Image (tube, rainbow, N blue to C red):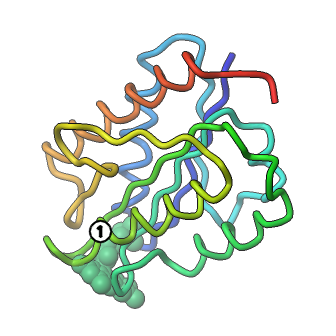
Amino acid sequence: MAKVMIIYYSRSGNTKKMAEFISEGMKKEEAIDVEVKPVQECRVEELLGADGILIGSPTYYGSMASEVKKLLDDSIKFHGKLDGKIGGAFSSSGNIGGGNETTIMGILEALLIHGMIVQGTPKGDHYGPVSIGKPDERSKRLCIEYGRRIAKLVLTTRRDL
Ligand SMILES: Cc1cc2nc3c(=O)[nH]c(=O)nc-3n(C[C@H](O)[C@H](O)[C@H](O)COP(=O)(O)O)c2cc1C
């Protein structure tokens, strides 16, 4: 089984819901073990055991929540050890143009620095799924599709680290 962690921060449940939809999409692929957990309960050591790591954050002032940034900063402990894993990001914001894409890109920057592999998409939400407030039907669909797409990528690129 390939293992994927979906780690999120969420105060009012919107990003959490996105994480659950992404997980739903991943589970459409066999041989994927998905763990969804709030960032506050995630120990940085757990990142080492995952083949794929997806991180979701609400958009706070156009960027990720400090709780998510802390996990990324703490991950310096394993700098070089996440090389080659699959990464991805998603975000919920209050407004269209409220900074959800910059939030995603901020997370992806850190994952790329770790040497992780990130896949965009030519259709839908290019950098990773976004939601304006509570995920609507469009956002739900894109989260599920994203989960499935990333699961496929994990299964095709998985290697023993
Ligand atoms: C401190 C703070 C800063 C925020 N900054 C932004 C922002 O810059 N742009 C935006 O569109 N929404 C902003 N919001 C709204 C949240 O991104 C939005 O409500 C989001 O859906 C919350 O996700 P959650 O339910 O997972 O906590 C902010 C909310 C808070 C509490």
Q: Quadrant of the C terminus?
A: top right
Residue 147 visible here: yes
Relative side of 126 to 136, left or right: right
**Image point 63% across, 62% down: which residue?**
39
Question: Hey, which residue is sitting farthest top in the picture?
Answer: 30
Residue 12 visible here: no
Quadrant hosting residue 86? top right
Instruction: Depth check: give the residue in front, 24 or 76.
Output: 76
Q: Is mark 1 on a helix, strand or loop?
A: helix
Q: Position of residue 81 (x, y in %)?
A: 81, 47
Quadrant hosting residue 44? bottom right
Instruction: Depth check: give the residue in front, 115 or 22.
Output: 115
Instruction: Depth check: give the residue in front, 78 or 29.
Output: 78
Examine the rendered structure and indicate whether residue 125 appears above or below residue 146: below
- The kind of residue tagged 1 is Asn
Q: Position of residue 157 (x, y in %)?
A: 59, 21
Q: Identify the residue position indicated by label 1 in the image.
A: 100
**Image point 23% across, 54% down: which residue?**
135
Q: Position of residue 101 (x, y in %)?
A: 30, 65
Examine the rendered structure and indicate whether residue 145 appears above or below residue 69: above
In the image, ligand 1 is in what quadrant?
Answer: bottom left
Examine the rendered structure and indicate whether residue 111 appears above or below residue 76: above
Question: Hey, which residue is sitting farthest bottom in the picture?
Answer: 61
Relative side of 97 to 102, left or right: left
Q: Position of residue 11 (x, y in %)?
A: 45, 73
**Image point 29% across, 30% down: which residue?**
145
Q: In which quarter of the image is the N terminus?
A: top right
Examine the rendered structure and indicate whether residue 8 appears above or below residue 64: above
State the count of labels: 1
**Image point 65% across, 22% down: which residue?**
158
Q: Residues within 10 Å of mark 1 (few under 14, many from 20)?
A: many
Is the C-beta of the residue carrying label 1 under 8 Å from the nearest atom of ligand 1? yes
